[in-house]
Image: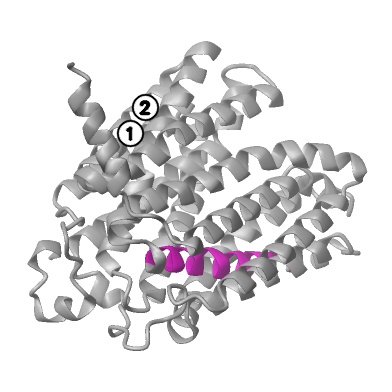
Amino acid sequence: MILVAPRARLTAWRRNSTRLPREAWVLIAANAVAALGYGVVSPVLPAFARTFGVSLGAVTFSITIFSVMRLFSAPPTGLLVQRLGERLVYVAGLLIVSVSTAACAFAQTYWQLLVLRAIGGIGSTLFFISALGLMIRISPPDARGRVAGLFVSSFLIGSVAGPLVGSLTAGLGLKAPFLIYGVSVLITAIVVSYSLRRSTLGAPAEHAEPAVTVRAALRQRAYRASLVSNFATGWAVFGLRMAIVPLFVSDVLARGPRMTGLVLGMFALGNLLVVSPSGYLSDRIGRRSLVIGGLLASGVSTIWLGAASSVPVFLVAACVAGATSGVYSSPQQAAIADILGSTARTGTAVSTFQMMVDLGAIVGSLSVAQIAEHLSYAWGFAVSGVVLLAAGVGWMFAPETRVEGHTPPPSEWETGTASELA
């Protein structure tokens, strides 16, 4: 009898849950393919770059140039989305990634490879910023956390499966993964273009609200807090894990590449287990508490990582760190959707939000590397944890963005009537 009431409430909630539109599933599937393809290419890219007889630094730059171009192309991409709309830019980004990646297989010199990777970074920016804008546009207000959770989960699944598929296709030669990724993204672009061609949700509304500029968005404390927390995510989740964790495994734990793969897999596993349920929960209880709790817990677990001295403890800490970052990632994206709304073009505001994670990844990887070299790895992890803790404190001064039954349009921001988001 004790379980009857909770079970009845759960059944009623499922019955009353908003059914996700078809366009949402199209974007989720496309996101998984994009992440899968990136993972297919990443294991062979360093070896392919070395075939041109360049130094280790040049090999590393052929990987870094992708992120650098993502960062610098974000502002113009936001303006492009503002003028042309998300759907057109989304498909164009997929086509650019497809052609540039497939062309890498035919590169004759290192510089050709570098240029093609740079073009691919621009296409990736077009794709991701417009994808986030489309997600905001098509997400029902009472299911934004759920869509964000599925969106992030699809990327994680693709990211985890990608290197596995890439290691298999590498047996076909170093050029094969580039061609496979290029063709798969081309097919995805065709499918997405066909699926969204008559979509009323994916197309801009005829009587849309005025475009949401960065200046207007910055008036909202929750938006400012989201920028800081996304920078912290880039620093700790991408910069620290991808640049420093492999070195920590080899230098401190004295283990090889297989252990590095296992550690990164534990990060992804923890994240995957939590990110979708957290998105569901944010639609019920709001975004703010989950974002604050997730950031603080992620900061503590990151500090714990640097203090680990044995492989079993480090693996457990990695899984916990992945889970805690998953707690806030979906609610944070849902909060951006709450803040910007779905009735106006939000290209520049979305691109600024996305740019912060790339900036954090670049600054974080460089900073933590210097800290680890001159102090210790433990200090590098500790500083990264403090960055996450600071982002969590920043969210304590921001309001809840999920407003029951009403999402204030951007026009209300200008007059100050949307006090709940001010």
Confirm or deny contact between disc 1 and disc 2 (CB under 8 A): yes
Whole-percent x, y for residue 390 in the image: 25, 43
Task: Name the side, left or right, on which 407 lies relative to 281.
Answer: left
Q: Quadrant of the N terminus?
A: top left
Please tell me how crowded label 2 is: few (under 14), some (14-19), or many (20+) other residues with Cα within 10 Å: many
Whole-percent x, y for residue 275 in the image: 41, 39
As for residue 131 lying within the magenta part, the answer is yes
Taking 284 as reference, is 421 above or below it?
A: below
Residue 200, image quadrant? bottom left
User: What type of secondary structure mainly makes up the magenta span?
Assistant: helix
Task: Name the side, left or right, on which 306 lies relative to 336.
Answer: right
What label sits on residue 172 in the rendered view? none
Q: Quadrant of the C terminus?
A: bottom left
Q: Secondary structure at mark 1?
A: helix
Taking 23 as reference, is 41 above or below it?
A: above
Looking at this view, is 418 or 324 the one in front? 418
**What's drawn in magenta, residue-wise?**
116-136
Looking at the rendered structure, the kind of residue marked 2 is Ser
Q: Secondary structure at mark 2?
A: helix
Question: Which residue position is annotated with label 2?
Answer: 301
